[in-house]
């Protein structure tokens, strides 16, 4: 992944080059904003998928299918997504 930000010394702040960000009457746009929007879309989708997986797991539990391959795969997906969410939280991205 190409990094668009650069760290400022060791104070925890970051900057982007002027060419990466433009401004007009509607706000800011550019490659940096597009990348941020993609990340936000990814995060929203991950949260939505966690909810969908939980509902499907509950349905399979109700049907007594907790030993099925589908149940096990969904449970694995939920755990993987949860791990990603924990990493995002550790970096202050929740």
Image (tube, rainbow, N blue to C red):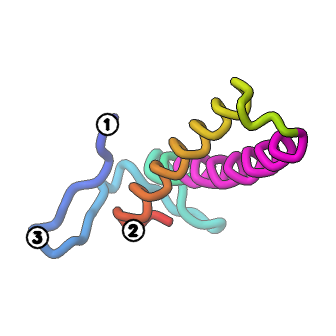
User: Which badge, 1 or 2, is on the more N-terminal residue?
Assistant: 1
Looking at the image, the residue that sits furthest to the bottom is 11
Left or right of residue 52: residue 74: left
Label 3 environment density (alpha carbons within 10 Å; few <14, some 14–19, many ≥20): few
**Is residue 58 on the magenta stretch?**
yes
Which residue is label 2 attached to? Answer: 92
The count of marks equals 3
Which disc number belongs to residue 28? Answer: none
Distance Cα–Cα, label 3 vs label 2: 17 Å
* Span of residues in magenta: 38-63
Which residue is label 1 attached to? Answer: 2
Left or right of residue 58: residue 75: left
* Placement of 3 over or under 21, stated as above or below: above
Label 2: which secondary element: loop
* CB contact under 8 Å: marks 1 and 3: no
- How far from the left and from the top, in percent, is residue 51? 74, 53
- How far from the left and from the top, in percent, is residue 34? 53, 47
Which residue is label 3 attached to? Answer: 10
Quarter holding the N terminus is top left
Left or right of residue 5: residue 85: right
Front: mark 3 or 2: 2
Residue at the spot x=16%, y=66% of the render? 8
Front-most of 24 and 71?
71
- The prevailing secondary structure element of the residues shown in magenta is helix
Label 3: which secondary element: loop
User: Which badge, 3 or 2, is on the more N-terminal residue?
Assistant: 3
User: Which badge, 1 or 3, is on the more N-terminal residue?
Assistant: 1
* Placement of 50 over or under 7, stated as above or below: above
Distance Cα–Cα, label 1 vs label 3: 21 Å
Front-most of 36 and 46?
46
Label 1 environment density (alpha carbons within 10 Å; few <14, some 14–19, many ≥20): few
């Amino acid at each position: 992944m190409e990094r668009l930000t650069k760290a400022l010394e060791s104070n925890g702040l970051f900057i982007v080059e002027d060419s990466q960000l433009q401004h007009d009457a509607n706000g800011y746009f550019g490659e940096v904003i597009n990348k941020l929007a993609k990340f936000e879309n990814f995060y929203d989708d991950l949260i939505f998928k966690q909810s969908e997986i939980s509902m499907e797991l509950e349905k399979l539990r109700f049907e007594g299918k907790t030993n099925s391959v589908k149940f096990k795969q969904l449970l694995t997906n939920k755990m993987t997504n949860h791990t990603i969410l924990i990493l995002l939280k550790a970096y202050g991205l929740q």
